[in-house]
C-alpha cells in the first residue's frame, strides 16, 4: 500500500489535478449518450445493491461523468436514491432522499441537492465523481476532502457497503497520489467496465 509524504503528495495532487481536469474535459466532449448508458449497464450488472438499499449518487457539474442514466436504472430496480449536501459544521456530507423531478437547492461547491425538508438517510452504496483513479481504488478528487471524511465515518459506523467511483476509462492513471487522510474506493465503473480495487481500504 503506497502513500506519499504530506508536502510531496500535496504537490503531486495539484499537478495531477491540472492535467486531469484538462483530460476529463476532453473525454467529456468526446462522450456520447451511449457512453453513460454503457457505464450504467456495467454497474447494474456487477454491483450488488441490497433489497431496498440506499444509494447516494450525485448530479453532475461541469464535465463530470453523468450518473443520471445509472440513477434512473437503479430507481427502476427498487433502490432508494439520495444526493449529498455539504454540512458546513462538520466538513462532511449528509445525504437526503431524492427522486428525479424533486426540487433542488444549492448544496455546496456548485452542486445541487435536495431541499432541507427531505429526510436524511445513511447510504449503503456511495457513488462518487472523480478527476483520476488507479486500479487500487486510489481516487483524486477536487481537494475538499468531503468524500474522504464522510466515507471514513460511515465505514467506522459499519455502514456504506461500497464506495464506487464513476468516470471515463481514460481517467485511469498508474497511481493516484494518496495520503493518510484519503480513502480508497472499492471499485470504479467506466464505460468500459468495472475495475474492482486491489487492497481497497482506509489508510
Image (tube, rainbow, N blue to C red):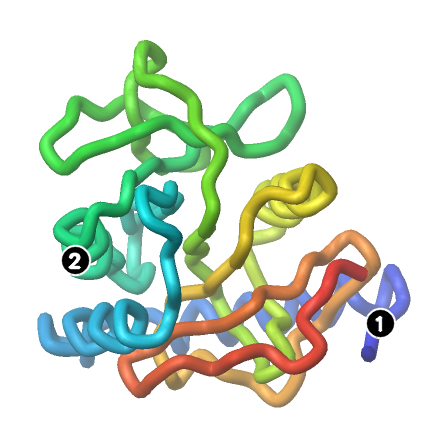
The x, y position of residue 49, in whole percent, is 37, 57
Q: Is residue 131 above or below residue 117?
A: below
How much space separates mark 2 and mark 1, taking CA atoms? 38 Å
Query: Pointers 2 and 1 in contact (CB under 8 A)?
Result: no
Residue at mark 2: 73
Taking the view exactly as shown, the residue that stands out farthest to the top is: 117
Taking the view exactly as shown, the residue that stands out farthest to the front is: 51
Report the front residue among 77 and 154: 77
Figure quadrant of the C terminus: bottom right
Which element is circle 2 on? helix
Quadrant housing residue 30? bottom left
Question: How many numbered badges does the structure rendering display?
Answer: 2
Q: Is residue 199 above or below residue 109?
A: below
The x, y position of residue 32, in whole percent, is 12, 76
Is any atom of residue 77 visible in this view?
Answer: yes
The x, y position of residue 170, in whole percent, is 39, 85
Residue at mark 1: 4
Q: Is residue 96 above or below residue 51?
A: above
Residue 73 as seen in the image, left or right of residue 179: left
Figure quadrant of the N terminus: bottom right
| Residue at image location 46% in from the left, 40% down from the top | 123
Residue 141 as seen in the image, left or right of residue 180: left
Point out the tag, 2 or 1, that comes first from the N-terminus: 1
Is any atom of residue 27 visible in this view?
Answer: no
Residue 7 as seen in the image, left or right of residue 71: right
The x, y position of residue 4, in whole percent, is 84, 72
Amino acid at each position: 500500500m503506497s502513500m506519499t509524504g504530506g508536502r510531496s503528495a500535496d504537490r503531486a495532487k495539484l499537478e495531477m489535478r491540472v492535467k486531469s481536469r484538462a483530460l476529463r474535459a476532453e473525454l467529456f466532449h468526446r462522450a456520447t449518450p451511449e457512453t453513460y448508458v454503457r457505464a450504467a449497464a456495467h454497474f447494474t450488472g456487477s454491483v450488488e445493491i441490497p433489497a431496498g438499499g440506499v444509494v447516494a449518487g450525485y448530479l453532475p457539474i461541469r464535465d463530470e461523468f453523468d450518473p443520471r442514466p445509472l440513477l434512473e436504472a437503479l430507481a427502476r430496480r427498487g433502490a432508494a436514491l439520495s444526493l449529498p449536501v455539504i454540512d458546513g459544521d462538520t466538513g462532511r456530507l449528509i445525504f437526503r432522499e431524492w427522486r428525479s423531478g424533486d426540487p433542488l437547492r444549492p448544496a455546496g461547491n456548485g452542486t445541487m441537492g435536495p431541499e432541507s425538508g427531505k429526510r436524511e438517510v445513511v447510504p449503503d452504496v456511495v457513488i462518487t465523481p472523480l478527476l483520476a483513479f488507479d486500479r487500487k481504488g486510489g481516487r483524486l478528487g477536487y481537494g475538499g476532502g468531503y468524500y474522504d471524511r464522510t466515507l471514513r465515518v460511515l465505514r467506522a459506523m459499519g455502514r456504506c457497503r461500497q464506495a464506487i467511483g464513476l468516470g471515463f476509462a481514460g481517467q485511469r492513471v498508474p497511481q493516484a497520489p494518496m495520503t493518510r487522510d484519503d480513502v480508497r474506493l472499492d471499485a470504479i465503473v467506466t464505460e468500459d467496465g468495472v475495475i474492482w480495487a486491489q487492497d481497497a481500504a482506509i489508510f
